[in-house]
Amino acid sequence: MTKVHQMYIGGKWVDALSGKAYDDLNPYTGEVYTRLASGGKQDAKRAIDAAAAAFPTWAGVPPSEKRALFLKAADVMERRAEEITLALAEEAGATVNWGRFQTGLGPGFLREAASQVHRVSGQIIPADLPGAFNMVLRQPVGVVGAISPWNAPVVLSLRAVVFPLAYGNTVVLKPSAESAFVGGVLMAEIFEEAGFPRGVFNLVTNGPGRSGEVGDQFIEDSRVRRITFTGSTEVGKQLAEKAGRHLKKMTMELGGNDPLIILEDADMEIAVDAAVFGRFMHQGQICMNSKRIIVEEPIIAEFLKRFVVRAAALKVGDPKDPETVIGPLINKTQLDKLIGQVNGAIADGAKLLCGGKYDGLCYHPTVLSGVTKEMRLFQEETFGPLAPVIAAKDAEDALQLANNSKYGLSSGIITRDFQKGLEMAERIESGVCHINDSSLHDEAHAPLGGMKESGWGRNGFESMEEFTELRWVSLQKTKRHYPI
C-alpha cells in the first residue's frame, strides 16, 4: 500500500478532513509515484486559521532570528539536493539538468529571503503642519495565500513563500496537484526541520478537480490579505476577477510567448546555444522558454542548418538518465494540445524540419520554419519542445514581430552591437529582457515579472512592495490649531 503524504497545518502533519487521497503519477512510466491528501475548502480554512493565529507572534520575531531560520533551511535543502532531484524526475518528469538547476537555485531564494529581513524599513517625510512629525511605516500584511505550478515546483513554491515570510507574514501554500510532493511536502519538511514556528508555513494539497475550492477560500477569507499565483493566463484572469470582487490584491506571473531575436550581426554559436537551451530546457515547459525564434533573413538559412542538427541530436527518454535532455510532458492533455499545435501549423504552411513524433509522453524536439504572424501558432503559447522559427526583414521588423503578442514576460536579443541591443531592449514589451542570452534566466534577487497578459507584480527585492502595507503615521508635538 502506497503511503499517503499528509498536509502540514499548524506545525502538524494531518489528513484531509474528508479522508480523501489521490494518486500522483510518474509522467514517464505512468505508474503511481505516491499518494497525497486531497484537501478542499475546509482544509484551506483550517490552514488559514493556523496562519492567522501564528501571524502576530511571527511578525514580532526579530529579523536576526528570521534570518537564522532561512539560512538553516537553505543548508537543509542543499543537504537533500540529490533526493529532491530524483523526486523532480519521478514526479514532474524533470531531467537531471533541470532538477539540479532547481536545487541549485532553491537555496539561493532562501538566502535571498534571509538577506531581506533587515530591509523592511520606513522613512521620515516632511510635515506641512507646525510641530508635526511624519513617519512612513512598512508592515507585514498578515496571511498570504500562495498557489504554485507544476513545471518548476521547487523554485516556484519557494519563491511564492519565502519573501512574504521574510517580511513577517505567514503563508498557506497550495502546490499543483501534479507536483504536490516535491513542490509541497518536501518544502514543508525543510521548513519544519529548519525550525520555523508552528503555523508560520502551512501546506494544503488537493487532488484533481479540487484546486478551485482552495483558491476560492483564499479569495473569500478576509484574513488572507494577499494572493500570489504562478500559472496560466486563463486561470490567472479567473482568480483576478474573483479577487477583484473582494478588493484583494494579487501578484501573478502568468503565461508567456517569449521571443528570442537573432540579429544579422549575431555570433552564430551564441545564437544557436541560446536557442537550444532557451527552447528545449525542461521539454519547453517553462513560462520563460524562448517560444518564438525570430531571425533576420540574411542569416536564417545558416541558423536553421545548425539549429536543426543540434535539436535533432538531443536525447529523448528517461529523465533520470543524466544524458537525457527531453523527458516527458507532464500529462496527456499537454501532449494532445502540442500535437494539435504542430499539425495546425503544418496545415497553415509551416515546414517540419525535425521531430513531429512522440513516444509515450516524450515529444521529440521539433523545429518548424516558415512560421508567420498570420498563423495561429504565432500567437499561442506552446508548452512543449516545439521551436517555431520566424523570418524578419530587419531589426525593426524583428522588434515588431516580438511585440505582436498579448504576452510580455521575457525576451532575448542576440547581437554583437551592444548599443543596438540596449535600444531594442528599451522598446521590447516584456518585463524581462536578456541581451546575448536566451529568454530563460532567473536569479533569486531579480525583479522578475511580466507585462500585458503575462501578469503583474514583481519578485526578488521588489517583493516588499507586494507583501507589505505602507502606512503614514503622524505625531503632533505641539498643540494644533483647528479651524473650527
Image: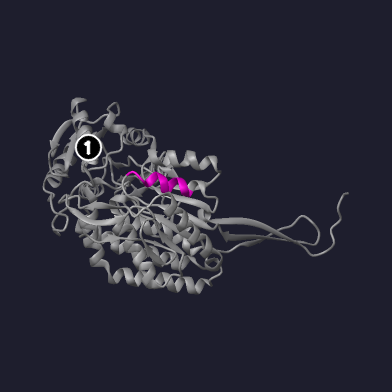
Magenta portion: prevailing SS class: helix
Quick one: quadrant of the N terminus? Answer: bottom left
Q: Nearer the viewer, residue 94 or 219?
A: 219
Residue 75: give x, y in percent of width and height: 34, 72
Residue found 26% across the figure and 48% down from its top: 278
SS under mark 1:
helix
Residue 317 locus on image (x, y percent): 12, 51
Q: Is residue 388 above or below residue 136?
A: above
Residue 18 position in % (x across, y down):
37, 53
Residue at position x 21%, y 41% in the image? 332
Please state the extent of the stretch shown in magenta in the rendering: 209-218
Q: Is residue 146 left or right of residue 304?
A: right
> Is 372 placed left or right of 40 in the picture?
left
Q: Please name the amino acid that badge 1 sits on.
A: Leu
Characterize the local packing of mark 1: few (<14), some (14-19) or many (20 or more) Cα atoms within 10 angstroms: many
Q: Label 1: which residue?
A: 338
Foreground: 413 or 220? 220
